[in-house]
Image: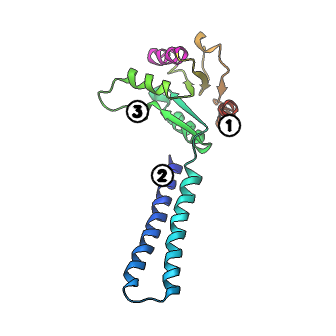
Amino acid sequence: MARRNFNKYASIIAIIISITGLIFLTIKADNHLSLSKIAIFIGGAALGALFSLIIFRLFSRNPKSTVFLIHNFQDKDVADKISLKLEDNQIKVIDEDDLYNYGDNIIKINQKAIRNSDIIIWLLSNSSKNDKLIKQFILESKSHSKRIVPVITEKIDHLPNSVTPYKMVDISENFDEGAQKLVDKILEKSR
């Protein structure tokens, strides 16, 4: 999210620079500036616009994959860390917490997010392993033939049977190493 905000602000600044150059050119043109000064102002405005386009192109590349991050509300901190890691690797993250407003139909919103995702990331913790709503979303994901990647976020006493068919990623002991494995797992299928 921080990277997205930086890109947006950098583009806005570049656009402001180019507009300022054009305004300055228009104001000064009335005072009979020399052709060389006018050329410098036009060149500056053009460079500002070019800079804006370059920043926009560099930082707003199409995501390599879109993942839907399903987790229990108690795992929000871990979900946020994973989201940042994935977004740093040009993976678009749909976090279920970002979708809801008061009074929304959570099931319909999640069904739409599942349909719009390439991969479902299922954060597994002691608080989420038996969550009925999460299980319903996993079944919905299966019905749409979505790729499901369970991510173990902490030591779990007993994994649910519904997890056993999947290759899991474990971030419980080493977050950085596990998160990189998750990124690699997502990107290997999108190449």
Compared to 181, does 32 lie above or below?
below
Magenta region includes residue 141? yes
Report the mark closest to the observer, 1 or 3: 3
The residue located at (49%, 16%) in the rendering is 140
Marks 3/2 in contact by CB < 8 Å: the verdict is: no
Task: Report x, y in % for residue 141.
Answer: 52, 19
Disc 3 from disc 2: Cα separation: 19 Å
C-alpha distance separating marks 1 and 3: 26 Å
Q: Is residue 103 left or right of residue 151?
A: left
Q: Residue at coordinates 62% horizontally, 42% vertically from top-left?
A: 89
- Which residue position holds label 2? 5
Disc 1 marks a residue whose amino acid type is: Gln
Q: Amino acid at mark 2?
A: Asn
Q: Which mark is residue 99?
A: 3
For mark 1, give the secondary structure. helix
Residue 76 in percent (x, y) is at 48, 33
Classed neighbour count for the residue bearing mark 2: other residues with Cα under 10 Å, few (<14), some (14–19), many (≥20): few
Question: What percent of the width, then of the height, locates residue 59?
Answer: 57, 52
Whichever of callouts 2 and 1 sits on the residue coming sooner in the sequence is 2
Mark 2 or mark 3, which is nearer the start of the sequence? 2
Q: Is 25 colored magenta in this rendering?
A: no
Residues 18 and 140: in front is 18
What quarter of the picture does the C terminus occupy?
A: top right
Magenta segment, which residues? 129-143
In the depicted structure, whether residue 183 falls above or below residue 154: below
Is residue 55 positioned above or below 146 on the image?
below
Separation of residues labelled 2 and 1 (CA atoms): 23 Å
Question: To which quarter of the image does residue 177 belong?
Answer: top right
